[in-house]
Protein backbone atom coordinates (compact mmCIF):
# COMPACT_ATOMS: atom_id res chain seq x y z
CA UNK A 1 0.00 0.00 0.00
CA UNK A 2 1.30 3.45 -0.90
CA UNK A 3 1.37 5.76 2.10
CA UNK A 4 0.00 9.29 2.04
CA UNK A 5 3.48 10.80 2.24
CA UNK A 6 4.90 8.47 -0.44
CA UNK A 7 2.01 9.32 -2.72
CA UNK A 8 2.66 12.98 -2.05
CA UNK A 9 6.33 12.45 -2.92
CA UNK A 10 5.22 11.02 -6.28
CA UNK A 11 2.79 13.89 -6.76
CA UNK A 12 5.49 16.41 -5.90
CA UNK A 13 7.86 14.73 -8.37
CA UNK A 14 5.25 14.95 -11.12
CA UNK A 15 4.57 18.56 -10.17
CA UNK A 16 8.27 19.42 -10.36
CA UNK A 17 8.34 18.08 -13.93
CA UNK A 18 5.18 19.98 -14.80
CA UNK A 19 6.59 23.15 -13.28
CA UNK A 20 9.00 23.35 -16.20
CA UNK A 21 5.94 24.25 -18.28
CA UNK A 22 4.46 27.71 -17.65
CA UNK A 23 0.77 27.51 -16.85
CA UNK A 24 -0.04 29.67 -19.87
CA UNK A 25 1.48 26.99 -22.15
CA UNK A 26 0.14 23.94 -20.31
CA UNK A 27 -1.39 21.21 -22.53
CA UNK A 28 -1.02 23.44 -25.55
CA UNK A 29 -1.43 20.57 -28.04
CA UNK A 30 -4.66 19.39 -26.37
CA UNK A 31 -6.03 22.92 -26.43
CA UNK A 32 -5.07 23.41 -30.08
CA UNK A 33 -6.69 20.11 -31.06
CA UNK A 34 -9.95 20.90 -29.24
CA UNK A 35 -10.13 24.39 -30.69
CA UNK A 36 -9.53 23.05 -34.20
CA UNK A 37 -12.45 20.67 -33.63
CA UNK A 38 -14.83 23.40 -32.50
CA UNK A 39 -13.74 25.60 -35.40
CA UNK A 40 -13.13 28.95 -33.71
CA UNK A 41 -11.08 30.66 -31.05
CA UNK A 42 -10.71 31.94 -28.46
CA UNK A 43 -12.78 29.86 -26.06
CA UNK A 44 -14.39 32.35 -23.68
CA UNK A 45 -14.69 31.40 -20.02
CA UNK A 46 -16.53 33.50 -17.46
CA UNK A 47 -14.90 33.45 -14.02
CA UNK A 48 -17.22 34.37 -11.18
CA UNK A 49 -17.81 33.84 -7.45
CA UNK A 50 -18.49 35.77 -4.29
CA UNK A 51 -16.31 38.63 -3.10
CA UNK A 52 -13.25 37.26 -1.30
CA UNK A 53 -13.28 33.82 -2.96
CA UNK A 54 -10.04 34.68 -4.73
CA UNK A 55 -10.92 35.11 -8.41
CA UNK A 56 -8.21 37.70 -8.98
CA UNK A 57 -5.67 35.65 -7.00
CA UNK A 58 -6.57 32.67 -9.17
CA UNK A 59 -5.98 34.62 -12.38
CA UNK A 60 -2.66 35.88 -11.05
CA UNK A 61 -1.64 32.30 -10.19
CA UNK A 62 -2.57 31.05 -13.66
CA UNK A 63 -0.54 33.76 -15.36
CA UNK A 64 2.23 33.58 -12.74
CA UNK A 65 2.22 37.36 -12.49
CA UNK A 66 -0.18 40.09 -11.40
CA UNK A 67 -2.74 40.57 -14.15
CA UNK A 68 -5.73 41.20 -11.89
CA UNK A 69 -5.66 43.47 -8.86
CA UNK A 70 -6.38 41.61 -5.63
CA UNK A 71 -8.69 43.06 -3.01
CA UNK A 72 -7.80 43.57 0.62
CA UNK A 73 -9.95 41.40 2.89
CA UNK A 74 -13.49 41.38 1.54
CA UNK A 75 -13.29 44.72 -0.28
CA UNK A 76 -14.25 44.13 -3.92
CA UNK A 77 -11.68 45.00 -6.59
CA UNK A 78 -13.33 43.54 -9.67
CA UNK A 79 -16.13 46.03 -10.24
CA UNK A 80 -16.17 45.77 -14.04
CA UNK A 81 -15.62 42.85 -16.41
CA UNK A 82 -12.06 42.32 -17.65
CA UNK A 83 -10.51 39.62 -19.86
CA UNK A 84 -7.17 37.77 -19.83
CA UNK A 85 -5.82 35.26 -22.36
CA UNK A 86 -4.09 31.89 -21.95
CA UNK A 87 -2.42 29.49 -24.37
CA UNK A 88 -1.39 32.04 -26.99
CA UNK A 89 -4.83 33.69 -26.76
CA UNK A 90 -6.71 30.47 -27.48
CA UNK A 91 -8.50 30.68 -24.12
CA UNK A 92 -9.89 33.95 -22.79
CA UNK A 93 -10.90 34.33 -19.14
CA UNK A 94 -13.46 36.97 -18.16
CA UNK A 95 -13.22 38.20 -14.57
CA UNK A 96 -16.61 39.34 -13.27
CA UNK A 97 -17.74 41.29 -10.19
CA UNK A 98 -18.20 39.22 -7.02
CA UNK A 99 -21.47 38.87 -5.15
CA UNK A 100 -21.84 39.57 -1.46
CA UNK A 101 -21.25 43.34 -1.39
CA UNK A 102 -24.82 44.32 -0.49
CA UNK A 103 -28.35 43.99 -1.89
CA UNK A 104 -28.15 46.77 -4.50
CA UNK A 105 -24.62 45.83 -5.56
CA UNK A 106 -25.58 42.17 -5.90
CA UNK A 107 -28.54 43.06 -8.12
CA UNK A 108 -26.28 45.11 -10.39
CA UNK A 109 -23.54 42.48 -10.44
CA UNK A 110 -26.04 39.68 -11.11
CA UNK A 111 -27.36 41.61 -14.10
CA UNK A 112 -23.83 42.00 -15.48
CA UNK A 113 -23.23 38.27 -15.13
CA UNK A 114 -26.52 37.32 -16.81
CA UNK A 115 -25.97 39.88 -19.58
CA UNK A 116 -22.56 38.35 -20.25
CA UNK A 117 -24.05 34.85 -20.37
CA UNK A 118 -26.59 36.00 -22.97
CA UNK A 119 -24.18 38.08 -25.01
CA UNK A 120 -24.33 36.68 -28.58
CA UNK A 121 -21.26 35.61 -30.51
CA UNK A 122 -21.51 38.29 -33.18
CA UNK A 123 -24.52 40.25 -34.38
CA UNK A 124 -27.75 38.28 -34.69
CA UNK A 125 -25.97 35.10 -33.62
CA UNK A 126 -27.88 32.21 -32.09
CA UNK A 127 -24.78 31.22 -30.16
CA UNK A 128 -23.48 32.56 -26.88
CA UNK A 129 -20.25 34.50 -26.49
CA UNK A 130 -19.41 32.67 -23.24
CA UNK A 131 -18.51 29.00 -23.74
CA UNK A 132 -17.92 27.95 -20.11
CA UNK A 133 -18.60 29.33 -16.64
CA UNK A 134 -16.01 28.78 -13.90
CA UNK A 135 -17.32 29.45 -10.39
CA UNK A 136 -14.69 29.96 -7.70
CA UNK A 137 -15.74 28.97 -4.16
CA UNK A 138 -14.10 30.03 -0.92
CA UNK A 139 -12.75 26.88 0.73
CA UNK A 140 -12.25 28.68 4.02
CA UNK A 141 -15.88 29.71 4.45
CA UNK A 142 -18.55 27.59 6.10
CA UNK A 143 -21.32 29.98 5.06
CA UNK A 144 -21.88 29.37 1.35
CA UNK A 145 -25.34 30.92 1.21
CA UNK A 146 -24.38 33.65 -1.27
CA UNK A 147 -22.43 31.13 -3.34
CA UNK A 148 -25.46 28.85 -3.65
CA UNK A 149 -27.59 31.85 -4.58
CA UNK A 150 -25.10 32.62 -7.35
CA UNK A 151 -25.10 29.01 -8.51
CA UNK A 152 -28.76 28.08 -8.13
CA UNK A 153 -30.42 31.37 -9.10
CA UNK A 154 -28.02 32.93 -11.60
CA UNK A 155 -25.65 30.42 -13.19
CA UNK A 156 -27.58 27.13 -13.39
CA UNK A 157 -30.81 28.62 -14.87
CA UNK A 158 -28.84 30.44 -17.56
CA UNK A 159 -26.08 27.98 -18.47
CA UNK A 160 -26.12 24.28 -19.47
CA UNK A 161 -24.90 22.16 -16.55
CA UNK A 162 -22.18 20.51 -18.66
CA UNK A 163 -20.65 23.95 -19.20
CA UNK A 164 -20.49 24.81 -15.49
CA UNK A 165 -17.16 24.23 -13.75
CA UNK A 166 -16.65 24.72 -10.02
CA UNK A 167 -13.35 25.03 -8.18
CA UNK A 168 -12.77 25.48 -4.45
CA UNK A 169 -10.00 28.00 -3.82
CA UNK A 170 -8.24 28.69 -0.50
CA UNK A 171 -8.35 24.98 0.30
CA UNK A 172 -5.50 25.59 2.75
CA UNK A 173 -8.08 27.30 4.98
CA UNK A 174 -10.60 24.47 4.74
CA UNK A 175 -10.20 23.68 8.44
CA UNK A 176 -9.13 27.15 9.52
CA UNK A 177 -5.57 26.38 8.46
CA UNK A 178 -5.39 23.18 10.49
CA UNK A 179 -3.93 20.11 8.77
CA UNK A 180 -2.24 22.25 6.12
CA UNK A 181 1.51 21.70 5.85
CA UNK A 182 2.93 25.20 5.39
CA UNK A 183 6.38 23.90 4.52
CA UNK A 184 5.41 21.53 1.71
CA UNK A 185 2.26 23.55 0.90
CA UNK A 186 0.12 20.43 0.80
CA UNK A 187 -2.89 19.22 2.82
CA UNK A 188 -2.74 16.43 5.37
CA UNK A 189 -5.17 13.49 4.95
CA UNK A 190 -7.68 15.00 7.40
CA UNK A 191 -7.96 18.16 5.31
CA UNK A 192 -8.16 16.17 2.06
CA UNK A 193 -11.11 14.23 3.50
CA UNK A 194 -12.85 17.47 4.50
CA UNK A 195 -12.29 18.98 1.05
CA UNK A 196 -13.62 15.86 -0.68
CA UNK A 197 -16.70 16.02 1.52
CA UNK A 198 -17.17 19.70 0.70
CA UNK A 199 -16.88 18.98 -3.02
CA UNK A 200 -19.63 16.36 -2.87
CA UNK A 201 -21.75 18.64 -0.70
CA UNK A 202 -21.69 21.28 -3.45
CA UNK A 203 -22.84 18.74 -6.04
CA UNK A 204 -25.65 17.53 -3.77
CA UNK A 205 -26.81 21.03 -2.78
CA UNK A 206 -27.06 22.15 -6.40
CA UNK A 207 -28.94 18.96 -7.35
CA UNK A 208 -31.39 19.36 -4.46
CA UNK A 209 -32.13 22.96 -5.46
CA UNK A 210 -32.18 22.64 -9.25
CA UNK A 211 -32.44 18.94 -10.13
CA UNK A 212 -29.30 19.27 -12.26
CA UNK A 213 -26.09 17.32 -11.89
CA UNK A 214 -22.88 19.33 -12.08
CA UNK A 215 -19.29 18.17 -12.24
CA UNK A 216 -17.58 17.53 -8.93
CA UNK A 217 -15.47 20.56 -7.97
CA UNK A 218 -11.70 20.36 -7.69
CA UNK A 219 -9.89 22.18 -4.88
CA UNK A 220 -6.75 24.29 -4.99
CA UNK A 221 -4.92 27.16 -3.33
CA UNK A 222 -3.98 30.01 -5.65
CA UNK A 223 -2.03 31.73 -2.88
CA UNK A 224 0.11 28.62 -2.26
CA UNK A 225 0.34 27.52 -5.90
CA UNK A 226 -1.26 24.18 -4.99
CA UNK A 227 -3.26 22.09 -7.50
CA UNK A 228 -3.19 24.83 -10.16
CA UNK A 229 -2.57 22.11 -12.70
CA UNK A 230 -5.77 20.40 -11.55
CA UNK A 231 -7.61 23.66 -12.16
CA UNK A 232 -6.13 23.83 -15.66
CA UNK A 233 -7.01 20.17 -16.26
CA UNK A 234 -10.60 20.93 -15.23
CA UNK A 235 -10.73 23.66 -17.86
CA UNK A 236 -8.92 21.82 -20.67
CA UNK A 237 -10.76 18.51 -20.14
CA UNK A 238 -14.10 20.32 -20.40
CA UNK A 239 -13.45 22.61 -23.35
CA UNK A 240 -16.61 22.37 -25.48
CA UNK A 241 -16.81 20.60 -28.81
CA UNK A 242 -19.71 22.75 -30.06
CA UNK A 243 -20.86 26.33 -29.79
CA UNK A 244 -23.29 27.18 -26.98
CA UNK A 245 -26.73 27.78 -28.41
CA UNK A 246 -28.61 30.59 -26.65
CA UNK A 247 -32.01 29.80 -25.14
Image: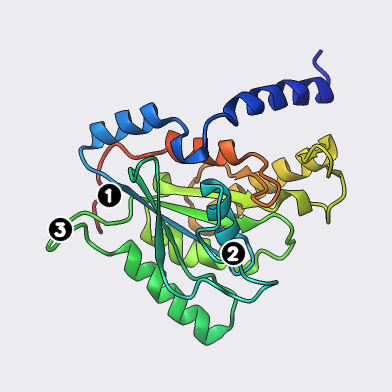
Q: Secondary structure at mark 1?
A: loop
Q: Residues within 10 Å of mark 1 (few under 14, many from 20)?
A: some
Quarter of image, res 13? top right
Mark 2 sits on what residue?
A: 147
The mark nearer the N terminus, 3 or 2, is: 3
Q: Quadrant of the C terminus?
A: bottom left
Q: Nearer the viewer, mark 3 or mark 2?
A: 3
The mark nearer the N terminus, 3 or 1, is: 3
Image coordinates of residue 169 in percent, x first then y, are 64, 52
**Total marks in image:** 3
What's the residue at 54%, 70% (across, down)? 98
Q: Nearer the viewer, residue 200 or 29?
A: 29
Q: Residues within 10 Å of mark 2 (few under 14, many from 20)?
A: many
What's the residue at 58%, 83% (across, down)? 102
Mark 1 sits on what residue?
A: 244
Q: What label does residue 125 carry, if any?
A: 3
Q: Nearer the viewer, residue 240 or 151?
A: 240
Image coordinates of residue 148 in percent, x first then y, are 58, 63
Amino acid sequence: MVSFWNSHFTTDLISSVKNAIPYKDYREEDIRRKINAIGYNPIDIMVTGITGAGKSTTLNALFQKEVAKEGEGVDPETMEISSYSLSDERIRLWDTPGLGDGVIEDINHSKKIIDLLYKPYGENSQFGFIDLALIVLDGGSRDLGTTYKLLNEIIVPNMPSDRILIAINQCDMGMKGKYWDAQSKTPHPELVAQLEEKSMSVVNRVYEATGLEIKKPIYYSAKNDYNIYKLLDLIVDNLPSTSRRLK
